[in-house]
């Protein structure tokens, strides 16, 4: 079994979900009391937010992630799993400086969407995810078009993540708001929806969404376990 390098802390809620799902899936796969071999590097989210939001310094934010990945490699990890969607925007810059592979969350999501024959999806996440290029570019390689919410809806999705979900706060009113955004994306042509933030499926379950949904955390964890025991 390969040792997983889990980059966490962005947020602690997402990190806890990754840790739990990786171990549950590993036990389901191998039986008995099997558990995943994980080395965790948990960064201080406040340092990251200060760089990204307060100072708008992408280079400083990237350096935080690079240092964490180096620590994972030095700790004996055989692959790196980032428990945060938007941080994957740094992978092209960081990967050449790290000697172990990254398991990219958008790649495993694209494969899952392709298997269902869906050609257009809506994308939810923080602003860096919804306005970034890493999801649209990777999905496009698989023949999938990406739709994002309008500006007001993007602000709503992003703000609720930062002000509530990463603080482990989940409310019925926010669930209703997210459902309304998904419906507007569906009307605009989305055949499915990418839940591109670990905390979103903790708020809104797939069975509560009236179009196919893709919980990136679950897809990422399944792919990680499969790769570790291959």
Image: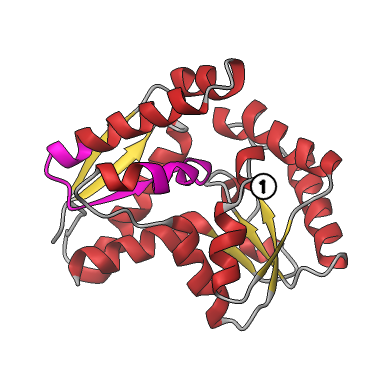
Please state the horizontal and vertical placement of residue 187, each as a whole percent of the image.
Answer: 88, 66
> What residue lies at 44% left-to-right and 23% top-to-bottom?
60
| Quadrant of res 22 | bottom left
Please state the horizontal and vertical placement of residue 76, each as a whole percent of the image.
Answer: 11, 44
> What residue lies at 61% left-to-right and 39% top-to-bottom?
128
Q: Is residue 87 left or right of residue 225?
A: right
Was residue 80 drawn as part of the magenta stretch in this picture?
A: yes
> What residue lies at 47% left-to-right and 32% top-to-bottom?
11
Was residue 176 drawn as part of the magenta stretch in this picture?
A: no
Residue corresponding to mark 1: 130
Residue 31 appearing in the image: no
Q: Residues within 10 Å of mark 1 (few under 14, many from 20)?
A: many
| Quadrant of res 61 | top left
Comparing 12 with 109, the one in front is 109
Indicate the secondary structure of the residue bearing disc 1. Answer: helix
> What residue lies at 30% left-to-right and 43% top-to-bottom?
6
Q: Is residue 151 left or right of residue 160?
A: right
The span shown in magenta is 72-93
Q: Work out which quarter of the rendered image holds the C terminus and state it.
A: bottom left
Comparing 90 with 120, the one in front is 90
Please state the horizontal and vertical placement of residue 92, each as a whole percent of the image.
Answer: 41, 48
């Amino acid at each position: 079994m390969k040792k997983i390098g889990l980059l966490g802390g962005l947020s602690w809620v997402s990190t806890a979900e990754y840790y739990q799902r990786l171990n549950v899936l590993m036990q389901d796969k191998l039986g008995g009391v099997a558990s995943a071999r994980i080395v965790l590097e948990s960064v201080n989210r406040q340092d990251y937010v200060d760089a990204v939001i307060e100072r708008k310094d992408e280079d400083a934010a990237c350096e935080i992630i690079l240092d964490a990945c180096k620590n994972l490699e030095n700790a004996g990890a055989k692959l790196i799993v980032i428990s945060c969607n938007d941080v994957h925007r740094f992978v092209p810059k960081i990967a050449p400086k790290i000697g172990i592979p990254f398991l990219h969350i958008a790649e495993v999501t694209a494969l899952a969407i392709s298997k269902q024959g869906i050609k257009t999806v809506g994308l939810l996440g923080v602003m860096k995810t919804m306005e970034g290029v890493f999801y649209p570019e990777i999905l496009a390689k698989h023949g999938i078009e990406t739709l994002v919410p309008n500006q007001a809806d993007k602000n709503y999705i992003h703000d609720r993540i930062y002000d509530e979900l990463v603080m482990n706060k989940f409310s019925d009113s926010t669930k209703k708001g997210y459902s309304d955004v998904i419906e507007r994306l569906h009307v605009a042509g989305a055949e499915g929806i990418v839940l591109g933030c670990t905390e979103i499926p903790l708020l809104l379950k797939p069975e509560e969404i009236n179009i196919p949904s893709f919980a990136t955390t679950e897809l990422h964890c399944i792919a990680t376990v499969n790769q570790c025991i291959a």
